[in-house]
Amino acid sequence: MPSKARLYAEVILPLPLFGTFTYSIPTTLEGKAAVGHRVIVPFGRKKYYTGIIESITPVAPEGFEVKDISSVLDPWPVVKHPQLKLWEWIAEYYLCTAGDVYKAAVPAGLKVESETFIELNPDYEEMPDARMTDREAIIMQSLDHNGKMTPAEISKKTGLNSIESTISSMVERRMLIIAEKLIERYRPKKETLVRLAVDRNDNEAMHKVFDAVKGAKKQEMMLITLLDNLNKRQQQQLPPEVPRQHLLEQSGLSPAILAALASKGIVEIFTREINRFNYTGTEQGELPKLSAPQSEALDSIHRMFIDKNVTLLHGVTSSGKTEIYIHLIDYILNKGSQALYLVPEIALTTQLTRRLQKVFGKRVIIYHSKFSDNERVDIWKRMLHDPSPCVVIGARSSLFLPFSRLGLVIVDEEHESSYKQFDPAPRYNARDCAIVLASMHGAKTLLGSATPAIETYYKALNGRYGLVTLSERYEGVQLPLIEIVDLNDERRRGRISGPMSARLAMMSREAVKGGEQVILFHNRRGFAPVVVCKQCGYVPKCQNCDVSLTYHRKAGEMVCHYCGATYKLPTICPACKEPAIEVYGYGTERIEEIAESSFPGARIMRMDLDTTRNKDSYLNIINDF
């Protein structure tokens, strides 16, 4: 019998290298590896990466030795066909590699990587004439004491900075050796549950259960608490199992009592992987009522979607575009499809989520970069395995999720520059990618803005996109009065010395005095954007980016807003050796300080990148406001 032909996989690796890499599929993995599967593959001498299979072919490559796939990580593909098509389009259109797109699209928790570990070379013998430097001696001592470590861990333990070159030199001299270890970043969230081991409706079995705990009052109390909970869950049509922690808290008893019931075969204790995102609020399901202009705009959008795949909703500020979006999402969900609602800033997801959850409840999924790796993997898996109707609301990264039945894409504030990723590659525009994504799924795209981008408005006026105009604000609310104040003129006249004009300060004081709120917008974070020596004009710059540094007073350091590098504020000028370093300009941190002194008694809250590192920070600040 002729031997069966081997199969070969073209694999995308999370590396900035053009093209795919060919690996052979071992006979033990045939049938387990398919397009979209995650696979562990060797790369180079010692590296291992998680790749995604792009295609499979029986044609053997020529001219080089083909390595085998080491393992297949999942029994199902983690990337779907439309996603791979989108990756291919982004790589071609934005002149980057498929590996760049893969790295940006897939959560880090799904990429098992080979992490470099350093350890002492047990065969190293110090030569009599070789002298070890102090840095090398400290590193050797730390590795001897702690064992295998990553460069970052060595730096943290020893307190030494920029140790890479030292380690490299020590590896070359065979003082140290490099070991590779595969790191699985994803940790599923698990819940321990308790269920009754016998049928509650079997009277004879229940008699035996209570006989078994007779004389053990605490065990009997635990059993009664469990039965009470199971009865409540039966009324609510919930599964007959109770979270272990909840049971212990309700009974006020120790885990040992529960373990005793399990040892008698009365209860079963088991763990189950759960999703981190369970909406606990109530789903009202009531759609917002539309005004006559909103209803007319909604009808026009439906008519436009008959002939046009992309429509622009040009609606003035506060005209009620969000209510129209909610009606469109409801229409799509009722058809059994999924919707994607893109917003330019993570802060906007916080405000919109509640409005959507009141109408759609658990069908609302939030996804953005402020979530941890584990949380993003959970959402990815939910989208992968659950094709039921849902609406995903998120920033630009959410367009990479594995949609099954995408029916509508809404790009709110489509003109925003935040949709464009500038660094690192892929340098994509999420608005344009969303239009391509929708076309690949046969879905419709709605672009919404009060001030559309020039190219979008041009396409709408020329008939390439549909155009719907909403020119009236909701309930006829008047547009705010905008007053422009010339700060240079104010400073020349000696009326002000800080960042606020006399008019702004007066109106803010009146608002606070009247129990009203004030929002001060400023486009610079930190305390002061300029650090300079007033004696010689020296300006501290980032060693990596060659840009001037911003002073952050609370952290007590200068920060590069490009790469995040931090530096101590010098007390003596490094150039002229004079104590003449000064900070100039105003950042949000400094304006917060000025507001506290200008409006005594008023509560001051600051919202910028420094105060919203946590994913719940936006929600907390908005709730407090």
Image (cartoon, rainbow, N blue to C red):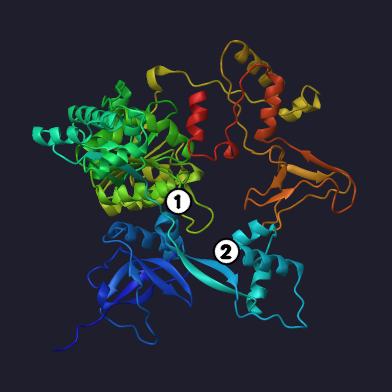
Camera-side residue of 85 and 377: 377
The image position of residue 472, as x and y in percent, is: 39, 23
Q: Crowding at label 2, few (<14), some or many (≥20) Cα neighbours within 10 Å?
A: some
Q: Crowding at label 1, few (<14), some or many (≥20) Cα neighbours within 10 Å?
A: some
Q: Is residue 519 left or right of 59 when viewed as pictured?
A: right
* Amino acid at pointer 1: Asn
* Amino acid at pointer 2: Met
Instruction: Kindly state the secondary structure of the residue where label 1 is placed.
Output: loop
Q: Which mark is residue 149?
A: 2
Image quadrant assignment for residue 324: top left
* Circles 1, 2 touching at the beta carbon (< 8 Å): no
Kindly identify the residue that appears in the image at 65 percent across and 34 percent down.
588
Kindly identify the residue that appears in the image at 62 percent across and 53 percent down.
563
Q: Residue furthest bottom?
A: 1
Quadrant (top left/top right/bottom left/bottom right) for the N terminus = bottom left
The image position of residue 44, as x and y in percent, is: 47, 77
Give the labeled residue for mark 1: 429
Q: Is residue 204 left or right of 545 when viewed as pictured?
A: left
Instruction: Kindly state the secondary structure of the residue where label 2 is placed.
Output: loop
Camera-side residue of 416 and 161: 161
Kindly identify the residue that appears in the image at 41 percent across and 23 percent down.
473
Question: Disc 1 and disc 2: Cα gap in Å?
Answer: 39 Å
Q: Is residue 423 left or right of 102 when viewed as pictured?
A: right
The image position of residue 609, as x and y in percent, is: 58, 40
Camera-side residue of 293 and 196: 196
Which label sits in the foreground, 1 or 2? 2
Q: Which mark is residue 161?
A: none
Q: Earlier in the sequence, mark 1 or mark 2?
A: 2
Relative to 379, is 496 above or below? above
Relative to 404, is 54 above or below? below
